[in-house]
Amino acid sequence: MLSYRHAFHAGNHADVLKHIVLIQLLRYLGQKDTPYMYIDTHAGAGVYALDTGYAAKSAECETGIARLWDQKDMPGPVADYVQLVRDMNPSGKMRYYPGSPYCADRVAREQDRIRLFELHPSDSKILQENFQKREAHLAEQGQRPASRGKRVMINKSDGFTGIRSLLPPPSRRGLVLIDPPYEIKDDYRKVKQMLDDALVRFATGTYAVWYPMLQRMESRQLPDKLKRLPCSGWLNVTLSVGAPVPDGVGLTSSGMFIINPPYTLEPMLRETMPWLVKTLARDNGARFTLETGLPVTGPGKRADE
Ligand code: SAM
C-alpha cells in the first residue's frame, strides 16, 4: 500500500527528533577519513515545500521546526540541525524542509556514499529531480567535480530487501536509516526481519530505526523486539510533545532506536532532550525517555549476565 506521503508530516516534532539524531550520527562517522556509506531504506521525496500542497494543508511543521526557527539558546545539535534547515532557506523565511536524504547529502563528504530507496513513484521521481537540480547547481558553481558520479544513488525499489545487496559496505563503515510509514502493521515485522538479516551481513554497522509510539500492539512491542537483536549495544530515545492521543487522531510521541550507537550519542542526547521537550511541549504530558543497553536474551536477562 503506497498511500503514505511524507509531505503531510514534513518538519513535525517526529522529524525534528529523527533528523537531529541522524545528523549527529553522520557527524560522528565523518570524524574519520575513511569513507562511510549512508543507506536510507525509506527515503521520501528529499525536500518538502512547507508553504504549499500537503505540508501547508496539515501544518504539522508547527509542532516541530517552526517552534525552533527563532530560538536563540539552542543546544549544539539542535543549532546544527536548524542551521542546515536555514541554509536551504536563504531568504530567512521558512519555506523548505529537508528530508533525510537532503540532511545526509549536506553532512556527508565527497568520499562518502549515499544510497536511497524510495518505492512511491511520485516521491521517487521528486527525489530524483531534487538531486539532479542540486547536482546541476553545484556543478554550475564549480563546487563538485564531474567525476562525482556514483556518490548518490537512488533506487525506486523496496528498501527492506534492496538493502541486502549493499551490505557490508566496502569500507565496513556505515549508517542505515530505517523509516517506513508503519501504516500497515506488516512494516513492524519487516523492520525486525530486515535487521535480523542485516546484522548478519554487517554486524558492526549503525542502524537507526524511527518508530511512532501508538496504542497498537505492534508499535508498543517493537522496541522490546529490537532490544533482543545481536549487537554491541543499543540506545532508545523517545520524545513526547504531549499526552497520548488515540491512534489515528495524530501523533504525539515517537522514538529513535539506534543499534550500535556511538558512545557520544547518549551524553549528547542527555543534554539536548530536556531543552527539546521544553521547547516543543504542547501540554504537560511532554517528556522524553532515554535508555541504553546490551541485547536482552530473555525476559529481563541481558547477554552479558
Ligand atoms: N526518511 C524520510 C525523511 O526522514 O525525510 C521520510 C520517509 S517516509 C516516513 C516513508 C517513505 O517510505 C515514504 O515516502 C514511502 O513512499 C516510502 N516507502 C514505503 N514502503 C517502502 C518500501 N518498501 N521501500 C522503499 N520505500 C518505501
Image (cartoon, grey):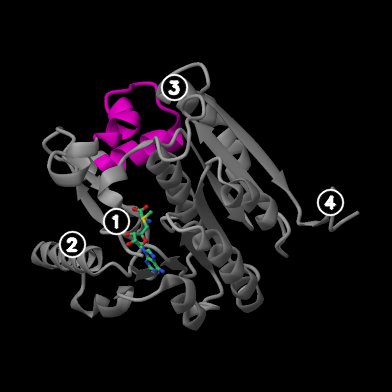
Is there a contact, CB below 8 Å, between mark 4 and mark 2? no
Residue type at mark 1 is Tyr
Mark pair 4, 2: CA separation? 47 Å
Residue 259 position by quadrant = bottom right
Helix, strand or loop at label 1? It is helix
- Say which of marks 2 and 3 sits in front: 3
Residue type at mark 2 is Asn
Mark pair 1, 4: CA separation? 40 Å
Is there a contact, CB below 8 Å, between mark 2 and mark 1? yes
Mark pair 2, 1: CA separation? 9 Å
Q: State the residue position of label 4.
A: 299
Q: State the residue position of label 1.
A: 102
* Of the pair 151 and 144, the residue shown nearer to us: 151
Mark pair 4, 3: CA separation? 34 Å
Q: Name the disc covering residue 130, or none.
A: 2
Q: Name the disc covering residue 277, or none.
A: none
Helix, strand or loop at label 2? It is helix
Residue 76 in the magenta stretch? The answer is yes
